[in-house]
Image (cartoon, rainbow, N blue to C red):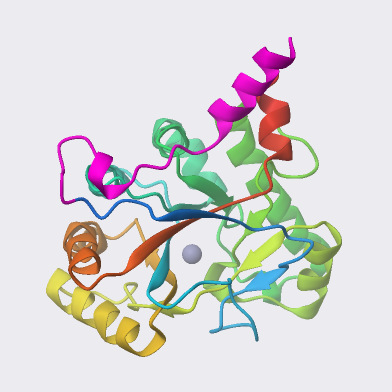
Amino acid sequence: MFRLFLLCVLSALPHLVAAAECPGNANALGTERVLTVDPAAVPRVGRKQFPTTLPLAPNEIVLTFDDGPWPATTARVLDALKSECVLATFFLVGRNTVANPALARRTLAEGHTVGYHSYSHPRLDQMALARAETDIDRGFAAVDTVLYGAAQSTPVTPFFRFPYFASNKGLLDRLFERKIAVFGADLWAADWIPMTPAEELHQIMQQLAVTKGGILLLHDTHRHTAATVPMLLRELKRRHFRVVHVVPPDRRLADLAKP
Ligand SMILES: [Zn+2]
């Protein structure tokens, strides 16, 4: 029984693929290592918004995608990540997850970390606290119901990112009390502005030259970003960046894997 339980726990852990082992791509970027992020120890990360970020070494990068899942574009991003054996974190919008459940399930099934980005993507900082928290909770419930078949009062993965990074003290305090880590970002390409993939790649690499890695924010809802990601992964490989996959402490995932 214990062996079966252990097997289930292990199967719930993301499967890391070193570059040399990536099927059909001998020169893949790959995923260098897994970093466990415990919200009790690391409640807020991202230097654009907070004083601290993840404990990353120089040239280590965490890829994050917001606002999906989105038809046409999310699948292209997932395809690009898969072909390079790269694992990322997706902050899903609840209503988009309800509208595109198969894409959300594919994201999880391919080993990516799935965090949350509210239900309806409002300016939460401008809403009454209770109403804002209701939208956040509705997002947790929508994503967890699609991915795991049911939702509890706490989300399966304790990772949240504010739409527009628009937080306030009351909401940050609530998430801290609930042991949910808030993700900001260390850099971005401003991909919410229309641009060509070449321009987007140039912006990202320019930023990376300054930050030497960190948490990169992208949006898998944009066609230009979907077109940029394959080029970005090749460029990261060429410039010797290493991808770090962030995961939560696995207690809840292990519970879900119990027979
Ligand atoms: Zn967003």
> Measured along the vertical axis of the image, is residue 147 above or below residue 138?
above
In this view of the protein, which residue sits in the foreground, 182 or 212? 212
Instruction: Locate residue 196, reporting x and y percent.
Output: 15, 73
Q: Is residue 20 magenta?
A: yes
In this view of the protein, which residue sits in the foreground, 70 or 32? 32
Left/right of residue 259 with respect to residue 208 in the rendered view: right
> Measured along the vertical axis of the image, is residue 35 above or below residue 169?
above
Q: Residue at x 47, y 52 (%)?
A: 90
Report the quarter where the C terminus lies: top right
Residue 103 visible? The answer is yes
Q: Residue at x 64, y 81 (%)?
A: 52
In this view of the protein, which residue sits in the foreground, 35 or 148? 35
Instruction: Locate residue 129, reporting x and y percent.
Output: 81, 68
Q: Which residues are magenta?
A: 1-27
Left/right of residue 245 with respect to residue 47 in the rendered view: left
Q: Residue at x 63, y 31 (%)?
A: 145
Q: Is residue 56 magenta?
A: no
> Measured along the vertical axis of the image, is residue 237 above or below residue 143?
below
**Quarter-of-image position of residue 156:** top right
Q: Residue at x 34, y 72 (%)?
A: 192
Instruction: Locate residue 48, reporting x and y percent.
Output: 53, 84
Count of numbered marks: 0
